Amino acid sequence: LEKTGGFHYERWDDAPVHSIAAALFAKKEQIHFWDEIGYEHPPYTHCPQKEETWRQEKCTCALQTRSEVW
């Protein structure tokens, strides 16, 4: 990855590399999916699926249309 220059010239982030490494080398029990935390970095979004969490945390995604886009 570094040889292509993408981290420097294309401004790649290291988070996808960490995610791939975790998926390849960590045991399922060692990984936690943070479902209760909303995230948006267009075009990617994740909105909490529990309505209680959605209301308590004052999420800005539309409750009726919340979904994950990855």
Image (cartoon, grey):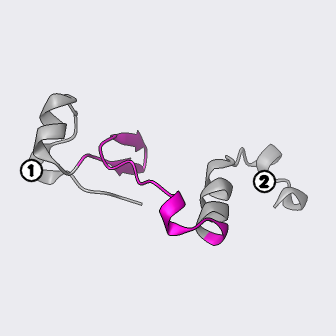
| Residue neighbourhood size for the residue with mark 2, other residues' Cα within 10 Å, grouped as few (<14), some (14–19), many (≥20) | few
User: Measuring 64% from the left and 71% from the top, which residue is drawn there?
Assistant: 24
Count how many numbered circles sit on residues in the image. Answer: 2
Q: Quadrant of residue 55?
A: top left
Neighbour class for label 1 at 10 Å: few (<14), some, many (≥20)? few
Residue at the image point whose x is 9% and y is 50% from the top: 64
Locate residue 57, reporting x and y percent: 22, 29
Taking the view exactly as shown, the residue that stands out farthest to the bottom is: 24
For the C terminus, the image quarter is bottom left
17 on left or right of 8:
left
Instruction: Tell me which segment is drawn in magenta.
Output: 24-48
Q: Position of residue 33 (x, y in %)?
A: 41, 54
Tag on residue 17? none
Residue 52 is situated, as x and y percent measured from the top left of the image, at 11, 40
> Which quadrant of the figure has residue 11?
top right
Q: How far apart, in angstroms, are the residues tagged by discs 2 and 1?
A: 38 Å
The residue wearing badge 2 is: 6
Between 62 and 9, the residue placed more toward the observer is: 62
Front position among marks 2 and 1: 1
Amino acid under disc 1 = Gln
Say left or right for 58 vs 5.
left
- Taking depth in this image into account, of 17 and 34 the one nearest to the observer is 34
Residue designated by label 1: 64
Q: Residue at x 35, y 58 (%)?
A: 69
Q: Inspect the image, locate mark 2, and give the three-letter code of the amino acid beneath it.
A: Gly
Answer whether residue 23 is magenta in the image.
no
At mark 2, the secondary structure is helix
On screen, residue 49 above or below 52:
below
Residue 31 belongs to the span the image colors magenta: yes
Question: Looking at the picture, how far across and down is residue 54, in whole percent?
Answer: 17, 38
